[in-house]
Amino acid sequence: MTGGLLDRRFFLKKGITFSVAVLASEPLHASTENYRQPWMEKPGEPFSNYGQPSAHEKETIRWTMGNSMAKGNGVSWTPLHDLEGTITPNGLHFERHHNGVPQIDPQKHQLLIHGVVKKPLIFDMDVLLRYPMVSRQCFIECGGNSNTGWRDEPIQTAAGYFHGMVSCSEWTGIPLKILLNKTILEESAKWVIAEGGDASMMNVSIPLEKMMDDCFLAIYQNGERIRPENGYPLRLIVPGWEGVVNVKWLRRLHLCNTPTMARNETSKYTELLPSGKARQFTFVMEAKSLITNPSYGYQLDKKGIYQISGLAWSGRGEIVKVEVSADGGKTWVEAELQQPVLSKCFTRFRIPWNWNGESTILKSRATDETGYVQPERKELIAERGKHGYFHYNGIVSWEITSKGVVSHVYA
């Protein structure tokens, strides 16, 4: 038994597709009543200079939470439960700000690269725009995403509003190694201190090896110039690593031989383990998956075939497998992965499910190309204790009642 989950090979053997099977399960009614609607009786709206979502989609928004004492300090979550595919629209990409969104004049913005280099350099935006660029789809996830999973009681809110501090875009910009090589690095250079141009001047330490590998300076996001809340006019992209190192409004790269031990790598992003030791510089975001449909807030109206859909990602590389359970983890069935499957990028998974109307629990677990398997919550807590706040990637469970109501549970 697999809890009603239907492997796509089931449909192939029957010579039908999943979509046809769903349609076949529903009665079709044709009617000519109300065939012509009011909007068909008059000309539509005129052209606009920049397209906006339909007014009927006004509930698909970022949910924001600020600090009442410091207005510019807070977060916003991407509504993953309302989205499909793998690319996050620019206006829905999650945010994390420490002192508001700076309104930077790109004609005055500069990037300084200095420290243990033989040739310190300053680049303005006009110069940077003349360099060769690359495009890459990758996710950015805040290290504090999903941190309510450490709590004793499961939070009851929409999936994107406690797992949505992660988004995925196509970023376009300059491979960082091109600029670093121009400065002629000293042999003692081992770390890079990246600093933002906002009022908090946030800075973090990143190993030079990573910076020379796949990091780049993004100027465009999903084809347009990066928006202010996501780092305009220049953002550091560190594929697969925690969001805090993807410094926005980048203004300075300081080469040195040791990390700076800034606030966001000492008092934050350092966690006490049950052994008494502490985790520090845990940059990589481990494999994770999340069923977004159905999830909290959804209502199953009747028995029959539904599509289970969700997202998986890993900072280690490609997702190679996502398994789904519809019986609380007793049995698992491999879901279909939407192509293309890209390294350090969102991967959409889907699987048909024949709900029998009984109460059950849905789960998903991801496996990446290194063989790492997303852990159960109890395994994560056994390893890291309950003092954690960052890097929560435990399996998420959704309970479906016999009335079709979906809630978040620990199972």
Image (tube, helix red, strand yellow):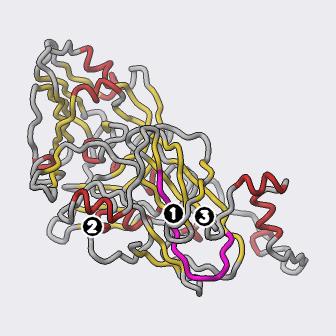
| Residue 129 at x, y percent in the picture | 39, 25
| Residue 39 at x, y percent in the picture | 75, 70
Foreground residue among 256 and 399: 399
Density class for disc 3 (Cα within 10 Å; few <14, some 14-19, many ≥20) is: many
Estimate the spatial distance between the alpha carbons at disc 2 and disc 1, rounded to whole Å. Answer: 19 Å
Residue 221 visible in the picture: no
Amino acid beneath label 1 = Ile
Question: Is there CB contact under 8 Å for labels 3 and 2?
Answer: no
Residue occupying the point 75% across, 57% down:
10
Estimate the spatial distance between the alpha carbons at disc 3 and disc 2, rounded to whole Å. Answer: 25 Å
Image position of 45 (left or right of 58): right
Read off the residue under disc 2. Answer: 150
| Residue 63 at x, y percent in the picture | 38, 67
Sequence order check, earlier mark of 1 and 3: 1
Q: Which residues are magenta?
A: 354-366
Density class for disc 2 (Cα within 10 Å; few <14, some 14-19, many ≥20) is: some
Foreground residue among 260 and 357: 357
Sequence order check, earlier mark of 2 and 1: 2
The N terminus lies in which quarter of the figure? bottom right
Q: Is residue 106 above or below residue 177?
A: below
Q: Is residue 365 magenta?
A: yes
Question: Is there CB contact under 8 Å for labels 1 and 3?
Answer: yes
Read off the residue under disc 1. Answer: 291
Residue 150 visible in the picture: yes
Residue occupying the point 17% across, 41% down:
204
Q: Is residue 313 magenta?
A: no
Image position of 345 (left or right of 335): left
Q: Secondary structure at mark 3?
A: strand
Q: Secondary structure at mark 1?
A: strand
Read off the residue under disc 3. Answer: 308
Foreground residue among 148 and 29: 148
Q: Secondary structure at mark 2?
A: helix
